[in-house]
Amino acid sequence: MKFNVSIALLATAGSAAATFKLKTVSANGEISGKTFNAAQSKIFTNLQNQNARCQHGTQDDATFQLRDGKLTLYATRAAPQQVYAQLITAEQGKMGYIRPGHGLPPGGELTGWAVDGSGHLKINGVGFVACPGAGQGAWTIYADVGHHSDCLDIEVEAVDEPKPLSCYYTEVEN
């Protein structure tokens, strides 16, 4: 089911945030329709095992929430991990996540996330690319700020998740 835009508007207005998966829309059949994963402080698609610790089950894709322009990984027991994109640095669009209170990488943006009228996720109006080479068929997701010659332009569709699992995703200390 495609993400309900009215839910996105409520979530950005500070009401209870909806939960959703993020799905890749691409002309490349290998990754089109694949959901996003979160592991080792990065965002991927087509990752075989993200090794998240979840309450009441397991899952190999990430669940997100959007509230007040901030994108987080869904969690109920602890403060949720916050998703960022490095838009203005040598990292050229690197996406990742951190625990609240931990240092944001240089040029990292935590705000500006939105789902547009077509149900596609953007950060400050910027779309995304998927880059091969993450190992075991996984692709790393970046904000599309240019300079990614081996990567594919993708649309990122928000898909409603009515029964989310609260998870903690693996992190790498910087």
Image (cartoon, rainbow, N blue to C red):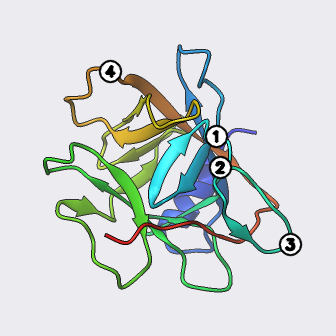
Q: Which mark is residue 35?
A: 1
Identify the residue at horizontal 61%, vertical 19% (top origin): 30
Crowdedness of circle 1 by 10 Å Cα count: few (<14), some, many (20+)?
many
Q: Please, what secondary structure does the residue beneath circle 1 have?
A: loop
Q: Name the residue under label 3.
A: 56
- Residue picked out by circle 4: 150
Type of amino acid at the residue the image marks with label 4: Asp
Q: Looking at the image, is mark 2 or mark 3 nearer the viewer?
A: 3
Residue 160, above or below 72:
above
Kind of residue indicated by mark 3: His
Q: Which amino acid does label 1 sit on?
A: Thr
Mark 1 / mark 4, whichever is N-terminal = 1
The answer to whether mark 1 and mark 2 are in CB contact below 8 A is yes
**Disc on the earlier residue, 1 or 3:** 1
Q: Which of marks 2 and 4 is in front?
A: 4
Quick one: label 2 or label 3, which is nearer the N terminus? 2
Q: In this view, does 90 lie to the left or right of 145?
A: left
Question: Residue visible at 58% across and 74% down?
Answer: 15
